């Protein structure tokens, strides 16, 4: 990076090096979670486009990645497509395109783009997306294989951490917290104190009853990086341990974070919908879920809307959405749980089987435990 | 809420979500809403170190901190004051100062904690602590400082140090805060966010005047590394933002210099050229011819290759260079072969040049025999020739016949030989390969080749064709540094400038090669002259006779080696 910066001091007109610098800043931003790098990355790509507005696929791809990180998937997709018009073989642009298509619910197109990406450049990035795609479609063993390949392909530390984290989460989401913990431990050995891994480990520990360890991990994680999802989980575990005041403080922080993110131009309605529904605020949840649903229809937005409507007591409206959420047969414990709740509320006998499915997928997660409780209550 | 992998991947890493760039411009913390930023300013005096430490919490850490400071809402003055005292005490515990290895304790002089409005109507917290440590800096000392406070959260961390009555020797940290003590953060795209948590500096009594320090890289072979440094300089100048006439002129001068320098480095067939010129009795004019040919060939080669590389991304530059090297070697080998043929022929006995031989030339064999006498003929010989070389040139490069008149052109491989005719002296041309035509030249013979004789001047000396051939061979392989200069200029949109630089480079090369050639020619002529005026032992005569063959073989071998190298190693 210093070499790139020095080069640009001597030759400020070198647009390719501006792109390379932007990419380096993005990578560094992901690695250190230091937001100073993101604003610099954005500036670098903008400068590159000023210098060379035509044929500059590198800058367009970088801007697409940044738009994706703000959850502005429509913009990310159009930027990626413009980059691909210039350079159809750019693996980075294909990656942005795949992510955007998946998040916009255009799964068949995503599959084609993903296949192109894998053909152009098999790498940790493309294999990780392949794994996610398979998981979405319920092929869990295939997803695991792809992630293991991604790990084997990984040469940089951040790629290895990425692969280990998702291997762990895949394992946990399908009922194997011990395997998950092993992956997280491996990752934390590479980079101790990584906030995402700490929070993931905390979730797994809480699930197997190591509450004290979980709370420690959550505390360390949110001190470094106050991710609202992690803060909410932390709050839940605190409350379960009887530390209600602290739990309230975490909830307060969550609201501040969402507010700041929205002020900053990020779209967080999906996350907000989940959060409000978890707290039982049905109307707020539905409003957020509906806003996101209007923007894009994916299995996730269907599920969020279904659950929000359920919490708001509108189960008849909720049911079609819950069914739509499972149309890819994702084997997602949360989807199954939400659907089971809705069916149970409507008195549909299928509820029993659905809730059982949720428990079978992951008995350890919060949803799985709740599903078991709901099943017992039937 | 379960955090399915979906959600995490969706965010392309949850991290990105939080660290996303704000679409709206203004924010109290352009670095991010969850950062905790630190600034430590140290002032060294002869009897104390005064530290002003500032901790600036962005909106989210402020929310978390305020939950303790003021659990019931907005903090009042008392709560802030007591929190300030607590936080400064924590901070002091996390600071380490050592003077010559001995730790020094801090005392807290003043504390202040205030809320500053930030984004989304949320407050941020700014803590300022004034600390003092008692030290003894009236003599030279080494001071080390570390700040470990709140090292988990991400943020800007700067340290600045200045002296009043104490001088900091080569301080690694600046004397003034680039952010005005965290009040305004610079958005310099060409620098990474600052993260300095410790530093060490030598101090001595005196006045402090700024900081800085650079490291100069070292390298091996001085000439080559000097050339490499000049190369980089030129490449830098091409890309210079402001191409003023002065800079352009300097760049051109530098290119000429580089051309000279690169011609001195191994390559460009200087050895072979030297052998050729020396063996073929080159004259000053010939040295210039070779030099000019090398330049023209090299310049044209660089321009063509540079244009091709710029236009075609499929062209593999290194492969082209490799095959050019092979062709160049082939050319040299052919020249060597002809030289050898000529040398062997004339050694085998005069019949060498039977083609196109002018009458006088036919006498080659005769003079050879007749030339057994040394001495007088030599002298005689010398007279008409101002530069006094005998003739003979024996190494012809083969074209055997050397004479012909016309020097030069003529055969394909040029090497003309034309030795004119006209010389009164017997040898006429024997050249061939000099085995001295008898005359004395014995030693002179194999050096020389020029028969100046005659006003008409045929010089015969290495025929112009031969010279051109050597020049082409020498200039055929473009110098990579010239190529880079051209391609870089094209890439940066300064094609004309690049072409001019390449031409200047070629001129530099020509100058060196011509100078080398002239030096060799001059050397040989002087040697010739000396030898021509003395009797040389018979041994030298034998050596002289075999010399052309040796030289020719040498040229041939070099050519073959160049070919082999290109074919084998470049693969």
Image: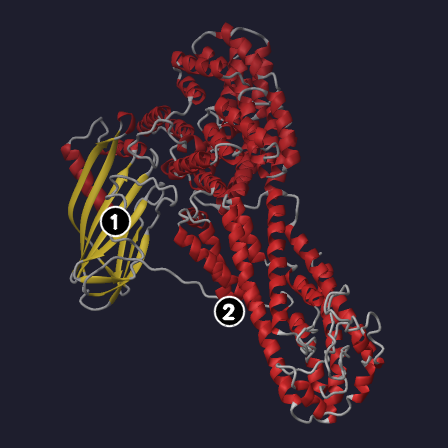
Residue B325: % across, % down: 68, 60
Name the residue: 73% across, 63% down.
Answer: B331
The subunit carrying tag 2 is: B
On screen, residue B96 versus residue A151, left or right, reads left
**Image position of B366 with respect to B499: above or below:** below
Q: Which mark is residue B490?
A: none
Total marks in image: 2
Residue A12: % across, % down: 42, 44
Q: Nearer the viewer, residue A48 or B152?
A: A48
Residue at label 2?
B223
Callout 1: helix, strand or loop? strand
The subunit carrying tag 1 is: B
Q: Spatial distance from mark 2 to mark 1, Cα to Cα? A: 47 Å
Where on the picture, by quarter, is residue A80?
top right
Where on the picture, by quarter, is residue A32?
top left
**Image position of A293 with respect to B535: above or below:** above
Residue at label 1?
B40
On screen, residue B373 versus residue B229, left or right, reads right
Tell me if residue A369 can be seen. Answer: yes
Mark 2 vs mark 1: which is more N-terminal?
1
Q: Nearer the viewer, residue B232 or A37?
A: B232
Residue B48: % across, % down: 17, 59
Name the residue: 48% across, 13% down.
Answer: A294
Assess disc 1: are there few (<14), some (14-19) or many (≥20) residues with their C-alpha within 10 Å of its C-alpha.
Answer: many
Callout 2: helix, strand or loop? helix
């Amino acid at each position: 990076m210093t070499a790139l910066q020095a080069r640009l001091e001597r030759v400020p007109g070198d647009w390719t090096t501006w792109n390379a610098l932007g990419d380096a800043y993005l990578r560094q931003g992901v690695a250190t979670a230091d937001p100073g790098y993101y604003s610099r990355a954005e500036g670098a790509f903008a400068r590159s486009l000023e210098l060379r507005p035509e044929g500059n696929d590198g800058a367009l791809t970088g801007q697409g990645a940044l738009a994706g990180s703000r959850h502005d998937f429509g913009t990310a997709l159009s930027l990626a497509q413009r980059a691909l018009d210039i350079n159809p073989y750019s693996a980075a642009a294909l990656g942005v395109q795949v992510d955007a298509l998946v998040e916009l619910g255009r799964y068949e197109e995503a599959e084609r783009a993903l296949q192109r990406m894998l053909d152009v450049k098999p790498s940790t990035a493309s294999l990780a997306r392949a794994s996610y795609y398979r998981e979405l479609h319920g092929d869990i063993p295939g997803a695991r294989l792809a992630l293991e390949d991604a790990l084997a392909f990984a040469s940089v530390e951040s790629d290895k951490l990425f692969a280990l984290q998702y291997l762990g989460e895949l394992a946990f989401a399908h009922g194997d917290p011990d395997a998950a913990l092993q992956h997280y431990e491996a990752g934390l050995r590479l980079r101790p104190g990584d906030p995402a891994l700490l929070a993931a480990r905390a979730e797994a520990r809480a699930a197997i009853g190591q509450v004290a360890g979980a709370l420690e991990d959550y505390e360390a994680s949110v001190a470094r990086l106050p991710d609202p999802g992690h803060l909410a989980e932390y709050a839940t575990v605190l409350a379960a341990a009887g530390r209600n005041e602290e739990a309230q403080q975490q909830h307060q922080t969550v609201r501040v974070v969402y507010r700041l993110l929205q002020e900053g131009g990020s779209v967080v309605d999906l996350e907000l919908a989940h959060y409000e529904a978890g707290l039982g605020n049905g109307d707020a949840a539905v409003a957020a879920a509906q806003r996101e649903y209007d923007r894009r229809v994916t299995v996730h937005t269907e599920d969020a809307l279904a659950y929000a409507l359920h919490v708001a007591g509108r189960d008849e409206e909720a049911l079609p959405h819950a069914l739509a959420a499972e149309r890819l047969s994702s084997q997602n414990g949360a989807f199954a749980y939400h659907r089971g709740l809705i069916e149970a509320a409507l008195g549909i006998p299928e509820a029993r089987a659905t809730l059982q499915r949720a428990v079978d997928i992951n008995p350890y997660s919060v949803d799985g435990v709740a599903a078991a409780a709901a099943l017992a209550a039937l | 809420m379960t955090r399915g992998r979906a959600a995490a991947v969706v965010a392309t890493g949850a991290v990105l979500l939080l660290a996303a760039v704000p679409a709206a411009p203004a924010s109290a913390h352009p670095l991010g809403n969850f950062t905790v930023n630190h600034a430590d300013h140290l002032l060294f005096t002869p009897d104390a170190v005064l530290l002003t430490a500032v901790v600036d919490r962005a909106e989210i850490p402020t929310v978390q901190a305020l939950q303790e400071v003021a659990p019931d809402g907005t903090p009042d003055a008392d709560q802030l004051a007591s929190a300030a005292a607590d936080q400064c005490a924590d901070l002091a515990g996390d600071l380490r100062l050592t003077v010559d290895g001995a730790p020094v304790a801090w005392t807290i002089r003043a504390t202040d904690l205030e809320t500053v409005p930030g984004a989304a109507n949320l407050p941020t917290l700014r803590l300022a602590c004034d600390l003092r440590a008692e030290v003894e800096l009236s003599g030279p000392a080494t001071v080390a400082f570390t700040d470990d406070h709140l090292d988990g959260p991400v943020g800007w961390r700067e340290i600045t140090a200045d002296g009043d009555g104490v001088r900091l020797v080569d301080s690694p940290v600046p004397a003034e805060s680039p952010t005005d003590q965290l009040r305004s953060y610079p958005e310099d795209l060409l620098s990474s966010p600052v993260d300095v948590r410790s530093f060490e500096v030598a101090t001595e009594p005196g006045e402090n005047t700024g900081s800085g320090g650079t490291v100069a890289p070292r390298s091996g072979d001085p000439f080559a590394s000097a050339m490499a440094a000049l190369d980089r300089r030129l490449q830098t100048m091409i890309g210079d933002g402001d191409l003023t006439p002065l800079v352009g002129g300097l760049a051109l001068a530098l290119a000429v210099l580089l051309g000279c320098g690169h011609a001195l480095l191994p390559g460009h067939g200087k050895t072979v050229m030297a052998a050729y010129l020396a063996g073929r009795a080159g004259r000053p004019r010939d040295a210039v011819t070779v030099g000019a040919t090398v330049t023209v060939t090299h310049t044209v080669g660089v321009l063509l290759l540079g244009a091709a590389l710029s236009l075609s991304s499929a062209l593999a530059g290194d492969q082209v260079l490799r095959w050019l090297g092979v062709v160049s070697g082939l050319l040299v080998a052919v020249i060597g072969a002809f030289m050898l043929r000529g040398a062997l022929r004339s050694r085998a006995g005069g019949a060498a040049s039977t083609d196109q031989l002018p009458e006088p030339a036919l006498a080659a064999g005769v003079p050879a025999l007749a030339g057994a006498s040394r001495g007088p003929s030599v002298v005689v010989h010398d007279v008409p020739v101002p530069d006094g070389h005998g003739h003979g040139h024996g190494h012809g490069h083969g074209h055997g016949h050397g004479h012909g008149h016309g020097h030069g052109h003529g055969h394909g491989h040029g090497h003309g030989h034309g030795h004119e005719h006209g010389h009164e002296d017997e040898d006429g041309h024997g050249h061939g390969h000099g085995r001295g035509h008898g005359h004395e030249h014995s030693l002179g013979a194999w050096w020389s080749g020029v028969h100046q004789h005659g006003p008409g001047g045929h010089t015969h000396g290495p025929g112009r064709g031969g010279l051109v051939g050597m020049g082409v061979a020498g200039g055929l392989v473009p110098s990579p540094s010239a190529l880079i200069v051209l391609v870089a200029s094209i890439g940066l949109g300064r094609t004309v400038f690049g072409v001019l630089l390449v031409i200047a480079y070629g001129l530099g090369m020509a100058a060196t090669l011509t100078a080398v050639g002239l030096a060799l020619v001059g050397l040989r002529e002087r040697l010739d002259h000396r030898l021509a005026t003395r009797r040389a032992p018979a041994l030298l005569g034998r050596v002289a006779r075999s010399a052309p063959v040796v030289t020719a073989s040498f040229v041939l071998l070099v050519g073959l080696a160049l070919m082999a190298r290109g074919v084998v190693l470049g693969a």
